[in-house]
Image: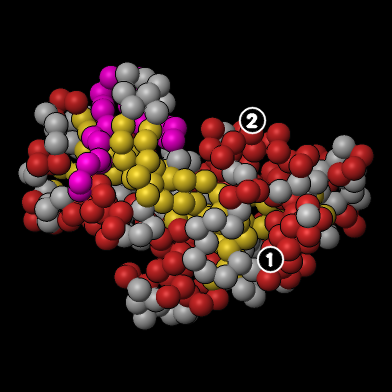
């Protein structure tokens, strides 16, 4: 189980006292809050770190209106690396993480008990969304020296479809299947982005899937070395995939996103921020209020390219399961004020 031990809490409290210069009574009031993300080479981790910055409200700090933190009072949030969406969803359901980022398609599947979440225990019905965040693009990264020009060329190649339990893996399998490529047509490699990067650099991998908001650090590093290109997902087959799987949309990775790689047609899903329904309404309200506080806009805009796409007007778009009652209360109040 993912949890803080009492010793770790005490040590962290002591460190915070030294750093912040706060009385011990403040440190004892701290609430630690984790945001499950993905690998350190992907987009989830930096975005989770940004969200953590918006919702953190150290005890004793100046009020938001006086230029202090606009986070949840007493909350200390931190991004935590994980294997990705599927693991994140299950950890939130089991209470092993307070919150997490996950792909919209997998959140929907977990809530309704379909796909890999069929007969899931505990039931996905306790999942709730705080906010829809930004689109995630499918990166099908190919090693230039592997001679891959089309999906047909992927047959017989060494392809990483990510780790078991990741959202990328499930969608990679579905995309390959739509192109007529079954599991026996290629050598599947279980590797996250960090390992895939190293394997490709050493010539031990021909291609890998990664679903994340661009730019992805692993892809940027490989592109700078002129080792890779992106294989487009477009045309009639891309349309077929969006018809088969409604959570996919047609997207493009702009030219210049990665050094030497042209504009690439692809598919995308959405990233959403999830919690358990057991979370108090007060805390869920505070999370939504802090995330969308106008003073926190600068954190999102300056922290990451995808942070700029985290906009209030998209906060409930593409959400296929219930929004947490506390967050919904915030949205309703804000909408009323804007009328």
* Span colored in magenta: 214-237
Furthest-front residue in this view: 339
Residue at image coords 36%, 81% = 119
Q: Which mark is residue 45?
A: none
Side (left or right) of 267 relative to 202: right
Residue 46: x %, y % from top left? 55, 40
Q: How is the image coloured?
A: secondary structure
Residue 161: x %, y % from top left? 26, 49
The C terminus sits in image quarter? bottom right
Q: Which mark is residue 328?
A: 1
Residue 192: x %, y % from top left? 34, 46
Residue at image coords 11%, 53% = 180
Q: Is residue 1 visible?
A: no
Residue 302: x %, y % from top left? 64, 30
Question: Which numbered mark, 1 or 2, is in the foreground of this view?
Answer: 1
Q: Which residue does the numbered mark 2 point to in the structure image? A: 302
SS type, badge 2: helix
Q: Is residue 235 magenta?
A: yes
Q: Is residue 37 magenta?
A: no
Mark 2 neighbour class, 10 Å CA radius: few under 14, some 14 to 19, many 20 or more:
few
Side (left or right) of 261 relative to 293: left
SS type, badge 1: helix
Mark 1 neighbour class, 10 Å CA radius: few under 14, some 14 to 19, many 20 or more:
many
Instruction: Answer above or below: position of 329 versus 215.
Output: below
Instruction: Answer above or below: position of 55 versus 143.
Output: below
Q: Is residue 277 visible?
A: yes
Side (left or right) of 264 relative to 105: left
Mark 1 vs 2, N-terminal side: 2
Alpha carbon of mark 1 to alpha carbon of mark 2: how far?
27 Å
């Amino acid at each position: 189980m993912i949890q803080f031990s009492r010793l770790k809490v005490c040590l962290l409290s002591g460190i915070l006292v030294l750093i912040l210069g706060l009385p011990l009574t403040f440190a004892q009031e701290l609430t630690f809050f984790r945001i499950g993300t993905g690998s350190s080479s992907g987009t989830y981790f930096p975005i989770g770190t940004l969200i953590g910055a918006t919702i953190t409200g150290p005890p004793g700090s100046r009020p938001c209106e006086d230029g202090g933190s606009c986070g949840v009072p007493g909350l200390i949030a931190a991004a935590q690396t994980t294997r990705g969406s599927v693991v994140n969803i299950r950890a939130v359901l089991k209470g092993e993480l307070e919150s997490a980022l996950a792909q919209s398609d997998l959140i929907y599947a977990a809530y309704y008990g379909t796909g890999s979440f069929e007969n899931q225990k505990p039931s996905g019905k306790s999942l709730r969304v705080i906010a829809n965040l930004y689109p995630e693009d499918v990166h099908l990264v190919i090693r230039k020296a592997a001679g891959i020009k089309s999906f047909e060329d992927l047959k017989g190649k060494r392809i990483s479809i990510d780790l078991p339990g990741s959202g990328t893996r499930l969608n990679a399998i579905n995309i390959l299947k739509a192109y007529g490529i079954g599991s026996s047509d290629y050598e599947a490699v279980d590797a996250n982005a960090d390992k895939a990067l190293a394997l490709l650099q050493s010539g031990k991998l021909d291609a890998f899937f990664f679903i994340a908001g661009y730019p992805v650090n692993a892809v940027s590093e490989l592109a700078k070395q002129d080792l890779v290109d992106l294989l487009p997902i477009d045309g009639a087959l891309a349309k077929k995939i969006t018809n088969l799987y409604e959570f996919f949309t047609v997207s493009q990775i702009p030219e210049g996103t990665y050094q030497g790689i042209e504009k690439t047609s692809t598919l995308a899903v959405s990233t959403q921020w999830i919690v358990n329904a057991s979370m108090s309404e007060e805390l869920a309200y505070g999370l939504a209020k802090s995330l969308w506080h106008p003073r926190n806009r600068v954190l999102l805009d300056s922290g990451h390219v995808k942070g700029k796409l985290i906009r209030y007007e998209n906060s409930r778009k593409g959400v296929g399961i219930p929004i947490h009652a506390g967050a919904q209360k915030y949205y309703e109040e804000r909408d009323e004020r804007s009328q």
